[in-house]
Amino acid sequence: MNTIGITGGISSGKSTISNTLKEWGFTVIDADVQARVVAQPNQEAYQEIVKSFGSEILLPDGHINRSMLGEIIFNNKEKRDLLNSIVHPAVRKNMLSEKEKAYKRGEDTVFMDIPLLYESKLTHYVEKVIVVYVDPSVQLKRLMERNQLTEEDALSRIKAQLPLEDKKKWADAVIDNNGTIDETKQQLKKILEEWNIL
Ligand code: ADP
């Protein structure tokens, strides 16, 4: 049984890789999706978030206003740590349970898409790490286009993460996503073949 981490930087191409893996029939457990799941009204973490941040972070329908919460924590380390201390354990629990389910279905390899794998020191959850890399200028351009951001806003999001250059050094394999999506898929295929996964 193999657990492989997919990581990189914001807008470096992790979702593109994850979608390809899903097309090829693999289970990809997405940390961001799980973070949204645990903040749903019927979840334990939701109750704790509301207790800690107050009902003013709720939308009229009772769901958490994610963009408001995002703004609160973006420039406030204490609040960010508080939110993480609620959300992270719940996300980890869900991810491990999804992994167990996949193994029980008889799958040999499971992928985990964890954007902040290194920042959150989660490398012990995976046996190997694939870093999806792009040059800074490409990352900036794709982020501005995808999220409709100004250069300044895009740069501040990029700078909130560890440099991609560092992540590249720590990786077991690197996918260079500066080229076409087809070239990226070819690199992924080659890595999985070398690791006897494909
Ligand atoms: P991440 O999940 O790492 O944030 P995405 O996979 O969403 O990144 O990619 C960021 C943006 O760049 C998306 O709009 C995506 O469609 C685009 N993109 C990703 N890879 C390529 C590529 N090789 N060529 C052109 N556009 C790409």
Image: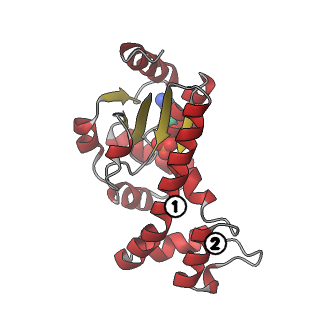
* Point 48% across, 42% down: residue: 113
On screen, residue 181 versus residue 163, left or right, reads: right
Residue type, label 2: Asn
Task: Tell me the amino acid under the disc marked 1.
Answer: Ala
Residue 64 falls in which quadrant of the image?
A: bottom right
Residue 29 quadrant: top right
Closest to the observer, 173 or 153: 173
Q: From the viewer's perspective, is residue 198 above or below residue 175? A: above
Q: In this view, does 153 lie above or below 114?
A: below
Dot in front, 1 or 2? 1
Q: Which residue is disc 1 drawn over?
A: 90
In this figure, what is the number of numbered marks? 2
Residue 167 relative to residue 106: left or right? left
Q: Whole-Å distance between the Cαs marked 1 and 2?
A: 19 Å
Give SS at disc 2.
loop
Residue 8 on image: x %, y %: 38, 42
Which residue does the image show at 35% across and 42% down from the upper left?
A: 137
Disc 1 C-beta below 8 A from ligand 1: no
**Label 1 neighbour load within 10 Å: few <14, some 14-19, many 20+:** some
Please say if 87 is above or below 183.
below
Residue located beneath label 2 in the image: 65
Residue for point 42% across, 69% down: 85
